[in-house]
Image (spheres, helix red, strand yellow):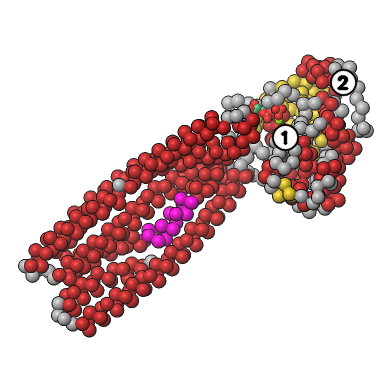
Amino acid sequence: MLGEVFCDLQQPTLMSNIIDHGLAKGDMHFVIQEALWMLMFAVLGLIFGATCGTLGSYASLKMGEALRSHMLTVALVDRQPGGLEPATLITRITNDVTQMQNLVMMITRGMVRAPMLLLGGVVMSVIVCPDLAPILFVIMPILVIFMLWIVRRSIPLYTKMQQAVDTVNRVMRENLQGAKTIKAYVLEDHQLDQFNDENAQLRQTSQRAAMATVILSPVIQLLLNLGVVVALGYGGSLAISQTISDGQIIAFVNYMIQITSAMIQTVNIITAFSRAITSATRVQAVLDEESAEQLPVVTTVVPTGSDVEFDDVTFGYQQSQPILNHVSFKLPAGKWLGIIGPTGAGKSSLINLLTRSFDQYTGTIKIGGTDIQEMSLAAVHQKITVALQDSLLFSGTVRSNLTYGAKAATDVGLAAANQVAVADEFVDRLPANYDAPVEQAGKNFSGGQRQRLNISRAIVPKRDILVMDDATSAVDQTTNAEIKTRLEQTRSDQTTVIISQRVTNVMDCDQIIVLEDGQITAHGSHAELLKQSDFYRQLVQTQLGGGRHGHASTRTS
Ligand SMILES: Nc1ncnc2c1ncn2[C@@H]1O[C@H](COP(=O)(O)OP(=O)(O)OP(=O)(O)O)[C@@H](O)[C@H]1O
Ligand SMILES: [Mg+2]
């Protein structure tokens, strides 16, 4: 970089020499010799410049790669409620990182080069032509003050602009994800209008931000051109009075042109800097989420017991609004627990705590007698798998989806799990079986099929504790009953938690919890709850017609 600057700074002096010592004296030999020097410095400058550019883009690409992967890691391990929204995370991981990459490119290319060229240009012009130097001393301070003023104005505008990008991303994402719903309600025009509004907002804020900086280059150009005119006029008069030579004036003007280009480069850097400062703050916010994740892990040892205990657990996504209120229960190892309750009661939230998706709660949760806060995440997930209520299939194959929790699972293992989840009947019919493709979010499978693969995926790793969070809600009654029977056959002596809206799914469990509005309002066996809980009794009345209080379980425990 310094080499490039040095080469650039030689040119005007060489040119001045050609004019004053070559052309003025008619010495062609000297002219050719100096011209060759100019050519050599030009080629050298080019080589230095190209090397710098290559190194700069390499550094910038590497930084982008590292930052993106680090941010995604942080986003994935986030265990606090109310973390950053996916839309803003996407903008931060893509757009903001790109801004920072641009800055790295600019820094390596120009951050040192431009100021050096600027400083070098000023020093050289003062040395070559001290008589004209005052022109620079007037122009430069004005320019610096003007540039600082613009930067101060533009940073908040860029912050606003990135926020507008977030919003556009969010609306876009929602629309694309909800395309089916939008079509079903014929809301295309409404959604497009909404999107266009946000888009217009983005255009306006971007325009304002761009306008704030766009004025810089022309102003610099104007002031320095004015300087050139003054230099030519004043310099000309000095030349006539023989105080300075023609070559000196030419050199001075050339240095001014170099200074102009260095200034404009500096402006571009400052613009990129304004944007990158905004982006860096936003990227930092993502990285900061990580610091809250440095939880003290006391043991990576997986407890042998598989009983589950909640002791006075209170939790809320917002501090002020508890979703779970003083929840306490004990599930002995090998027993089955049913959880039933109205929608929004906090059933899934309870499971989220058990799997340590969120850690900000009061009270204690234990697995096998060990506080889960003292277990590593890996240890928790060695003990427990969950067939989540809103679980996603990922693009890949049936096999890649089923082996999420157990990479080494064999086809025999997959077949056994599929059998329990009643997923065998359709997977076996697929031409490629386990290698059959799964599209994004599993949209080439039906809702019920996706749920059965989701259950199978939770069974494949063969964990001591299995949780089914409303995992059969989209499955037909017959299949649902079949899954229940097969689960009972294979897991009768293993800890199992069944969350369901269907009484038939929980009534055979060793204990059942009725969760209403974040509180356990009843806890006991089916027969006990019929006596204790109005909510449960009514549910049984509605779903079973009140006549079926006994049960036909295949479970023996
Ligand atoms: N990520 C979240 N952020 C903020 N609030 C949430 C979040 N997830 C759930 N809630 C709120 O917590 C409450 C309990 O939700 P939860 O999903 O635990 O209910 P649920 O009992 O599983 O309901 P359902 O039977 O419909 O699945 C609801 O009022 C919901 O609005
Ligand atoms: Mg739920």
Q: Residue 18: x and y, percent? A: 21, 76
Any mark on residue 389, and which? Answer: 1
Considering only order in the chain, which callout, 2 or 1, is on the residue closer to the N terminus? 1
Which residue is rendered at x = 40% and y = 38% of the image?
204
Q: Verify whether residue 52 appears in magenta.
A: no
Q: Residue 354: x and y, percent? A: 72, 36
Q: What residue span does the magenta drawing correspond to?
A: 98-112
Any mark on residue 399, and which? Answer: none
Identify the residue position indicated by label 2 in the image: 527
Task: Choose mark 1 or mark 2, whichever is in front.
Answer: 1
Which residue is rendered at x = 78% and y = 54% of the image?
408
Q: Verify whether residue 101 appears in magenta.
A: yes
Q: Amino acid at mark 2?
A: Ala
Q: Nearer the viewer, residue 21 or 323?
A: 21
Cβ–Cβ under 8 Å for marks 1 and 2: no
Q: Amino acid at mark 1?
A: Gln
Q: With respect to residue 46, does 340 lie above or below?
A: above
Q: Secondary structure at mark 1?
A: loop
